[in-house]
Image: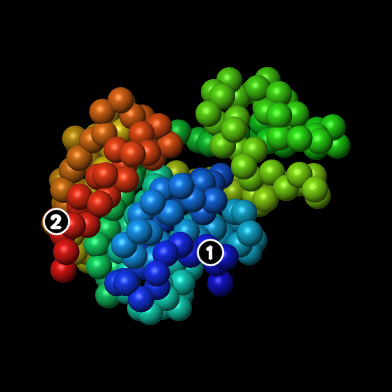
Amino acid sequence: MLHYTTHGDATAERPLVIVHGLYGSGRNWGVIARRLSDERQVVTPDMRNHAHSFWDDRHDYPALAEDLAKLIETLGGEADVVGHSMGGKASMMLALTRPELVSRLIVADIAPVPYTHDQTQFIQAMRAVDLSKVEKRSDAIDQLAVNVPDTTLQTFFTQSLDLPNKRWRLNLDALEDQMANVIGFPTDVSGSFSGPTLFLSGADSDYVKPEYRDLTRALFPKARYAKIPGAGHWLHAEKPREFEASVRAFLERAKA
């Protein structure tokens, strides 16, 4: 069972589950989750091989979707779901394989297609950090800066650092071994999800391209598209208020 954190009133209406991306955690979504919990319960799980959830050699989208299905069944059997990047693919797989569990779906800056951008360079960068010399997060940031010039990513990665035990709360071995699954997407998925679906992307990102729309609409016939100006792939971190407003507006318009 996935580790998860809840925010807000569980009796208000069906919960909103927010699914983080690769190398992330539910903690990354804490501010947005708390703000969205003013009207409902918001649940932020840690995905397998991340943060406080279990580690497993398998890391593919059918497995991640099954993890989410078990969580939603525990929460009552139906939820609205927001997923970013890897979490967006896991959420799409959930909606396609267990549509009865998903009422409304928001996919943040990802499409149901395989990508070619390998992310193992960040695993190597984290492994290169000499944790014996890390007493505070800034020490790890200084070391990460050698291989990761983006200051946002430096801070993001160190959120998965277990300082007292001098370890990463990421199963780097499994994630590296399963990277082809992470950047891919199953081609044998059948059926479609007929619920309201929003593909929300950063206007400066190239993850959701116009040429993906035919395939996307075949799987998600009620798909709608929106962009957040001035945001890239990390749209929720770069434009949190705009992201929150987009989620609220879509959920309000798409009330079942």
Residue topped by disc 1: 4
Marks 1 and 2, how far apart at CA: 28 Å
User: Mark 2 is on which residue type?
Assistant: Arg
Percent coordinates x, y for residue 216 in the rendering: 21, 49
Say few, some or many: other residues with alpha carbon within 10 Å of mark 1 (under 14 / 14 to 19 / 20 or more): some
Percent coordinates x, y for residue 179 in the rendering: 53, 45
Q: Nearer the viewer, residue 247 or 81?
A: 247
Question: In the figure, 256 relative to 210: above or below?
Answer: below
Percent coordinates x, y for residue 151 in the rendering: 56, 24
Tag 2 or tag 1, which sits nearer the N-term?
A: 1
Give the colour scheme shown.
rainbow
All told, the count of numbered labels is 2
Percent coordinates x, y for residue 249 in the rendering: 20, 50
The residue shown at (35%, 59%) is: 38
Q: Is residue 58 visible?
A: no
The residue shown at (86%, 37%) is: 132
Horizontal arrangement in the rendering, residue 148 relative to residue 9 (left or right): right
User: Mark 1 is on which residue type?
Assistant: Tyr
Q: Is residue 6 visible?
A: yes
Quarter of the image with the C terminus in it: bottom left
The residue shown at (46%, 72%) is: 71
Q: Nearer the viewer, residue 252 or 104?
A: 252
Question: In the figure, 238 relative to 185: above or below?
Answer: above
Question: In the figure, 143 relative to 174: above or below?
Answer: above
Q: Could you tell me which secondary element the residue under label 1 belongs to?
A: strand
* Image-quadrant location for residue 208: top left
Q: Could you tell me which secondary element the residue under label 2 belongs to?
A: helix
The residue shown at (22%, 57%) is: 251
Residue topped by disc 2: 253
